Amino acid sequence: MCGIAGAFRPGGARTSDATMARMRDRIAHRGPDGAGLWRSRDGSFLLAHRRLSIIDLSEAASQPMWNERGDVTIIFNGELYNHAEVRKELEALGRYTWKTDHSDTEALLHAYEEWGLPGIEKFFGMFAVAICDERNAGSPRLHLVRDRVGIKPMYLTRTSSGEWLFASEIKALLEHEDVKPEMDLTALWHYFTFIVAPAPLTLFRGIFKIAAGHRVTIEADGRARATRYWDCKPDASRMFRDAEMSDGKAVDELERLLRKSVERRMVSDVPFGVLLSGGVDSSLNVALMAERMNRPVDTFSVGYEDEESYNEFTHARRVSGIFKTAHHEVLIKRKEAEDFLPRLVELQDEPIADNVCIPLYFLSELVKKSGTTVVQVGEGSDENFLGYWWCEHYRRKDAEVYRKARQKSSLFQRLLGRSSPLLSDEDREFEARARKGQELFWGGAACFVGRMRDQLTPDPSLFTQAIDCPVEGLLPDSHRALDSHAVVSHYLGNFGPGFGNDEILAKIPYMEMKLRLSEHLLMRVDKLTMAHAVEARVPFLDHEVVEFAARLPARYKLRDGVGKWVVKKVAERHLPADLVYRKKQGFGAPMEEWFKDPGFGKRCVAAWERSQFRKLGLIDDSFVDGLLKAQTEGGGGRSFQLWTILNAVLWHERWISKSENFF
C-alpha cells in the first residue's frame, strides 16, 4: 500500500523534480517507509512514490521499479495477493531477471511485459497502477489502471500546457502550480443526491477519478482513452439454476470462496488483524482468519462515550472471547470528534457525507498504535448479498407501489400525474418515478431527491456549467446533465430481460457496486485508514466472490425477509446462531444526538452563516435554516441531510475559499 504521483507530457514533462517531490510528500501519510522519484531518459515521464512496506520489505522492492532494459517502469498502490503464483508462471518462461525475493510490484512489472494489459487481470487484489511503456521508440505511452472493484483511488487531470498529472489523492495534484482548485457545479449537484460525486467526476473542476474496473491509456500524441475491462452486471441467462446450485451447494461454495479470500488477504510481511464490530461480516472474518493462525487474531473495536446505543463492544467482546483474540478498543469523546472535523475535510479531499468516517479514523489510529499495519474489513457483504433492511423495503415497494403505478390505465391520472391522497410522501415519490419512467432504486444513500431536492436547489440554472473532459470515453453524457436520475439510468438502463419480479433485487447490488461502494464506502476506508498508514483489505470484495454473488438468484440472498441468507448460513457454521441473527445495528456516529446538542449545533450554524459557500446562493438559505431549526429545536430526523450540507460547506471553505477557521 502506497501513495503515487506522476506526470506525462510527450516531448518532455514540464513538472520539475522539486514540484513532483512536493506532490509526492503531500501524501506521505500513505507511505512513511520510503520515497522514490524517477524521470525517463527523454524527460516525458516523471514518477514519484511513497512506500508503505508490507510485502518484501527490502530496498530492492522500492518504487518506481523498471525492467532490465529500462523501457518499462511502474508505480502502484495496493496489494496483489496471488503474486507468488504469477511469479512462478513467469519464472517458468525463463525470460526475466528477478532482483527481489518476493515483491508483488516486480511480478506485476514482468506480467505486463509478458502479456500486456491483460496481464494485470491475472492478479487478485486491489491496485491503482501507472505503467510507463517506452518499448516503441519515439512513441511512449502511459497506462493508468484502477482495480476491478475500485478499492484504490486514482485521480488525473490535464494542464493547459497539455501535461497529464495523476495521483492517489487530489491534494497531491493541488500541489502543482498549474492546478488551481475550482468547484465543479455539476459534480456538486450530483453530490447532494448521492452524498459523493459519481466517478469520473470530482468536486474539483477538471480533476477526474478513474472509475472502478477501468483503465486510461495516454498515447505519445497526448490523446487519452478510457476502457472498461471488468464489470459485474448480472445476466439473467447466466444465473445459477436449481439443478446446479442447491441451497447446500450455494453455502458450501460461498464458504470456500470466502475462506480462500481471507487466506489471500493474510499475505503480509507485517502484523495484521481485523476491524471487529461484532456483526456477522467482521465476526466471520475473524473466524476464518483464526482457522489459519497459530497466534491470537488482533481485533479492534470503537465506541462512543455516553452513547451506549451506538456501541457494539458487548458483541465484539463476545466474538473476541469465542476466538480468544487479542482485542483492542477505543472510546471516542464527543468533543474530540467535533474537533476532528477540520482534519476530516483535509483527509477526504472531496466530501464523503458519511459519518462513519469519524469512528473509522479513530479506529485506524488505534490499529496503528497497536503496532498493526494491515486489517481486514467487512465492506461488500451487505451490498452484494442484500443485507440492508431497505432491500426488503424496496422489494415490497416495487410490488405494492412502483409496478402498480406503471401499469395504471387511468388516462386522467397518467396525464395529470396525480397520486392518491392516502399515500405516504415516500410512496408518492415512488409513484412519480414510475410515471416518469425512472428507476425505483437510486442507491442506498440517496439524500436530496424529489421534493426535498426542489426545496434545496430551487434554481438549477445556477449549477449550469460545461464540463471539458480530456479523456475519450471517461465521462458519460449522463453525468454531464443536472439530472441525477440520468446517472442512475446510466448504470441500470438496458438491464436485460429475464429477471421477472426479482429485477429490483438484481439491480440493487449492481447499482451499489457502481456508485456507492466504489466512491463512498471504499473511499472512506481508503482515506481514513491510510491517514494512519494502515492498509485495509476487503475479503467480501474478492472479485471471485463478487462474480459468484452476481450469478446467485435473489432467493439465496433475501429469503423470508432475511437479508444475506447465504452469508448467514455460512456464518452459522462458525458463530452462535443468536449472534448471526441478531438485529443489525450498523456502524456509525450519533449524529442525530450531536446535531441536537447546543454546542455542536451552534458550531454548525456559525459555520454555515459565515461561509462563502452560503453567499453563492446555490442552495436555499431559508430551507437550510429550517432543517437546522427542525433538528435542534424540533423532533430531529434531519441529521443525514444536515451532515451532507455541512460536509459540502466545510469542503468549500477549506479547499475553494481557503479559509483558515471554517469550523
Image (cartoon, rainbow, N blue to C red):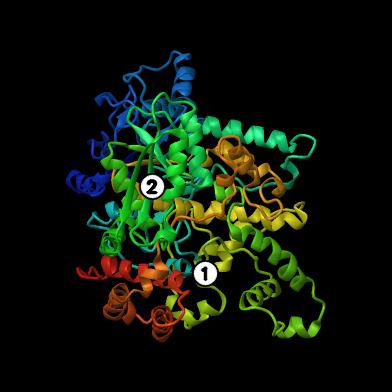
Q: Which residue: 42% across, 63% down?
A: 468
Q: CA gap, disc 1 to disc 2?
A: 42 Å
For the C terminus, which image quadrant?
Answer: bottom left
For the N terminus, which image quadrant?
Answer: top left
Q: Which mark is residue 177?
A: none
Q: Is residue 71 above or below residue 433?
A: above
Query: What's the residue type where badge 2 is placed?
Result: Ser
Query: Which secondary structure lies at badge 1?
Result: loop
Query: Which secondary structure lies at badge 2?
Result: strand
Q: Of residues 190 and 574, which is closer to you in this image?
A: 574
Query: What's the residue type where badge 1 is placed?
Result: Ala
Q: Is residue 235 left or right of residue 326?
A: right
On the image, which quarter does residue 352 sit in? bottom left
Classed neighbour count for the residue bearing mark 2: other residues with Cα under 10 Å, few (<14), some (14–19), many (≥20)? many
Q: Are marks 1 and 2 in contact (CB under 8 Å)?
A: no
Q: Which residue: 41% across, 81% down?
A: 624
Q: Which residue: 67% across, 52% down?
A: 506
Q: Of residues 644 and 150, which is closer to you in this image?
A: 644
On the image, which quarter does residue 608 sit in? bottom left
> In this orientation, does residue 48 appear?
no
Q: Position of residue 594 (x, y in %)?
A: 36, 69
The single residue placed furthest to the left in the displayed view is 18
Q: Position of residue 300 (x, y in %)?
A: 37, 43
Q: Of residues 176 and 263, which is closer to you in this image?
A: 263
The single residue placed furthest to the right in the displayed view is 409
> In this orientation, does residue 17 appear?
yes
Which mark is in front, 1 or 2? 2
Residue at numbered disc 1? 481
Residue at numbered disc 2? 301
If you read the primary sequence from the N terminus, does the residue marked by circle 1 or circle 2 appear first? 2
Q: Position of residue 659 (x, y in %)?
A: 22, 70
